[in-house]
Image (tube, helix red, strand yellow):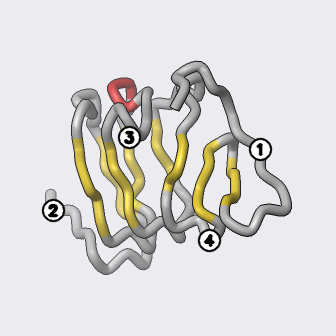
Amino acid sequence: MNSHIGAVKITDNDFYESQDGVLYTKNLDSLVYWPSDKKVTELIFPSTLTRLSLDENTIPCISEVTQLTIPRDLTEINSVRGIDSLSTIKVEKGNERFTLYS
Protein backbone atom coordinates (compact mmCIF):
# COMPACT_ATOMS: atom_id res chain seq x y z
CA MET A 1 0.00 0.00 0.00
CA ASN A 2 1.02 3.59 -0.45
CA SER A 3 2.83 4.70 2.70
CA HIS A 4 1.32 8.19 2.42
CA ILE A 5 -2.30 7.10 2.68
CA GLY A 6 -3.96 8.52 5.79
CA ALA A 7 -6.91 7.56 7.97
CA VAL A 8 -9.70 5.49 6.48
CA LYS A 9 -13.43 6.01 6.92
CA ILE A 10 -15.75 3.28 5.67
CA THR A 11 -19.53 3.39 5.84
CA ASP A 12 -22.14 0.92 4.57
CA ASN A 13 -19.64 -1.69 3.36
CA ASP A 14 -20.23 -5.45 3.41
CA PHE A 15 -16.56 -6.38 3.88
CA TYR A 16 -14.74 -3.68 5.85
CA GLU A 17 -15.26 -1.37 8.80
CA SER A 18 -13.15 1.53 10.03
CA GLN A 19 -12.62 2.46 13.64
CA ASP A 20 -10.57 5.52 14.64
CA GLY A 21 -9.17 5.71 11.10
CA VAL A 22 -7.96 2.08 11.12
CA LEU A 23 -9.39 -0.43 8.63
CA TYR A 24 -10.63 -3.83 9.86
CA THR A 25 -12.63 -6.66 8.37
CA LYS A 26 -16.39 -6.16 8.74
CA ASN A 27 -16.68 -8.12 11.99
CA LEU A 28 -13.59 -6.38 13.45
CA ASP A 29 -11.69 -9.64 13.82
CA SER A 30 -8.70 -8.77 11.64
CA LEU A 31 -6.64 -5.63 11.07
CA VAL A 32 -6.44 -4.74 7.37
CA TYR A 33 -4.71 -1.34 7.28
CA TRP A 34 -3.09 1.02 9.80
CA PRO A 35 -2.53 4.53 8.38
CA SER A 36 1.14 5.54 8.24
CA ASP A 37 0.28 8.95 9.69
CA LYS A 38 -1.50 7.47 12.74
CA LYS A 39 1.18 7.63 15.44
CA VAL A 40 0.48 6.10 18.84
CA THR A 41 2.48 4.85 21.80
CA GLU A 42 -0.35 2.67 23.12
CA LEU A 43 -2.03 0.00 20.99
CA ILE A 44 -5.61 -0.81 21.90
CA PHE A 45 -7.69 -2.85 19.47
CA PRO A 46 -11.36 -3.85 19.32
CA SER A 47 -12.16 -6.69 21.74
CA THR A 48 -13.29 -8.80 18.77
CA LEU A 49 -9.86 -8.87 17.08
CA THR A 50 -8.78 -12.53 16.80
CA ARG A 51 -5.48 -12.36 14.91
CA LEU A 52 -2.76 -9.75 14.59
CA SER A 53 0.72 -9.10 13.23
CA LEU A 54 2.84 -6.76 15.31
CA ASP A 55 5.39 -5.48 12.82
CA GLU A 56 6.28 -2.39 10.80
CA ASN A 57 4.50 -3.70 7.69
CA THR A 58 1.18 -3.90 9.54
CA ILE A 59 1.59 -0.98 11.97
CA PRO A 60 4.11 1.59 10.66
CA CYS A 61 4.52 3.29 14.08
CA ILE A 62 5.30 -0.01 15.87
CA SER A 63 8.78 1.17 16.93
CA GLU A 64 7.18 3.96 19.01
CA VAL A 65 4.76 1.68 20.87
CA THR A 66 5.40 1.38 24.61
CA GLN A 67 2.11 -0.23 25.70
CA LEU A 68 0.02 -3.02 24.18
CA THR A 69 -3.38 -4.30 25.28
CA ILE A 70 -4.13 -7.85 24.11
CA PRO A 71 -7.82 -7.89 23.07
CA ARG A 72 -10.33 -10.24 24.71
CA ASP A 73 -10.83 -12.43 21.61
CA LEU A 74 -7.22 -12.47 20.34
CA THR A 75 -6.06 -16.02 19.71
CA GLU A 76 -3.16 -15.55 17.30
CA ILE A 77 -0.19 -13.21 16.91
CA ASN A 78 1.43 -13.93 13.54
CA SER A 79 4.64 -11.96 13.93
CA VAL A 80 6.36 -9.64 16.38
CA ARG A 81 9.10 -7.40 14.96
CA GLY A 82 10.27 -3.85 15.58
CA ILE A 83 8.40 -3.36 18.85
CA ASP A 84 11.60 -2.72 20.84
CA SER A 85 10.16 0.17 22.93
CA LEU A 86 7.42 -2.01 24.44
CA SER A 87 7.45 -1.77 28.24
CA THR A 88 3.88 -2.70 29.24
CA ILE A 89 1.56 -5.50 28.11
CA LYS A 90 -2.00 -5.77 29.39
CA VAL A 91 -4.46 -8.59 28.69
CA GLU A 92 -8.11 -7.58 28.35
CA LYS A 93 -10.45 -9.25 30.84
CA GLY A 94 -12.00 -12.39 29.38
CA ASN A 95 -9.03 -13.41 27.22
CA GLU A 96 -8.36 -17.04 28.11
CA ARG A 97 -5.49 -17.62 25.63
CA PHE A 98 -2.92 -15.15 26.92
CA THR A 99 -1.60 -15.03 30.46
CA LEU A 100 0.93 -12.61 31.92
CA TYR A 101 3.35 -13.70 34.59
CA SER A 102 5.26 -11.32 36.85
Amino acid type, label 3? Gln
Position of 63 relative to 48 (above/below): above
Question: Is the Cβ of the residue at disc 1 closer than 8 Å to that at disc 4?
Answer: no
Amino acid type, label 4? Asn
Position of 10 relative to 7 (above/below): below
Q: Quadrant for the C terminus, please.
A: bottom left
Q: Nearer the viewer, residue 44 or 20?
A: 20
At a point 59% along the width and 23% down the height, the residue shown is: 37
Q: Earlier in the sequence, mark 3 or mark 1?
A: 1
How far is mark 2 from mark 1, CA to CA? 38 Å
For disc 2, the marked residue is 101
Query: In the drawing, does residue 26 fall left or right of residue 56?
Result: right
For disc 1, the marked residue is 9
Q: Earlier in the sequence, mark 2 or mark 1?
A: 1
Q: Earlier in the sequence, mark 2 or mark 4?
A: 4
Residue 6 screen position, x and y as percent: 66, 27
Amino acid type, label 1? Lys
For disc 3, the marked residue is 67
For disc 4, the marked residue is 27
SS category of the residue bearing label 1: loop
